């Protein structure tokens, strides 16, 4: 009899775990859908405000925090971007690029906003060169960002990340770096 009760309890726990996993995945998907739709619908000059409004309504929305960070980074508001990326990673530990961008922003020299390119590269190397496209959620966010900026030259995944999260000034700098023969920047090429 106790064996039957134990088996039933185990089955109930497994079933409850499966239901919770499905609900969690559904909630995550809804958060991503809402954040991406909001970001893409907002004019470029209003994306920061749109993400802040969404975060006011859904503080746990990791992609909204991430896209807020990108909007702030594009505007060279490095300190605010660092906080937003940190909040994104805190709310969704699977956002590997959020951790990378948090540390890169924190290490950036505030007097040289263009330093962000160097810091992303250095941080990526310090983190043992993670695959920035290795996680589906990171890819989904980067695909969204690619719809909001000019076409990139042929870039490696790391170069693409840099291109998509930074603004026009840094993108022009990336193009200049690609034209050099400096080995340090070869990792940006496809």
Image (cartoon, rainbow, N blue to C red):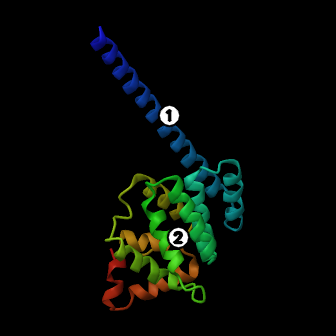
- Horizontal side of residue 190 vs 30, given as left or right: left
Q: Secondary structure at mark 2?
A: helix
Residue 124 found in image quarter: bottom left
Direction from residue 30 to residue 160 in the image, left or right: left
Image location (x, y in percent) of residue 142: 48, 61
Q: Quadrant of the C terminus?
A: bottom left
Name the residue rendered at 70%, 48% in the picture.
57
Residue 162 in view in this figure: yes
Which class describes the residues within 10 Å of circle 2: few (<14), some (14-19), or many (20+)? many
Give the mark nearer the N terminus: 1 vs 2.
1
Q: Residue at x 71, y 52 (%)?
A: 56
Residue sitting at x 64%, y 76%? 77
Q: Of residues 130 and 171, which is closer to you in this image?
A: 130
Q: Marks 1 and 2, how far apart in space?
A: 30 Å
Question: Disc 1 or disc 2, which is closer to the eye?
Answer: 1
* Residue at the disc numbered 2: 165
Within 10 Å of disc 1 (Cα), the crowding (few <14, some 14-19, many 20+) is few
Viewer-proximal residue, 89 or 160? 89
At mark 1, the secondary structure is helix
Q: Position of residue 17 (x, y in %)?
A: 41, 30
Above or below — where is 95 with respect to 109? above
The residue pinned by badge 1 equals 23
162 and 189: which is toward the camera: 162
């Amino acid at each position: 009899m106790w064996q039957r009760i134990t088996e039933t309890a185990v089955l109930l726990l497994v079933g409850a775990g499966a239901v919770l996993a499905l609900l969690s995945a559904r909630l995550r998907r809804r958060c991503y859908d809402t954040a991406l739709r909001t970001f893409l619908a907002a004019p470029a000059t209003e994306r920061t405000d749109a993400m802040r409004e969404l975060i006011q309504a859904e503080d746990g929305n990791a992609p909204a925090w991430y896209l807020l960070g990108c909007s702030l980074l594009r505007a060279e508001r490095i300190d605010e971007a660092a906080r937003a990326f940190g909040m994104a990673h805190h709310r969704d530990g699977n956002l590997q690029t959020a951790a990378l961008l948090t540390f890169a922003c924190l290490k950036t020299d505030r007097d040289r906003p263009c330093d962000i390119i160097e810091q992303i590269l250095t941080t990526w190397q310090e983190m043992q060169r993670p695959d920035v496209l290795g996680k589906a959620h990171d890819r989904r966010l980067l695909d969204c960002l690619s719809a909001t900026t000019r076409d990139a030259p042929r870039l490696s995944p790391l170069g693409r990340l840099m291109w998509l999260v930074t603004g026009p000034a840094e993108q022009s700098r990336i193009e200049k770096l690609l034209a050099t023969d400096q080995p340090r920047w070869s990792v940006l090429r496809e």
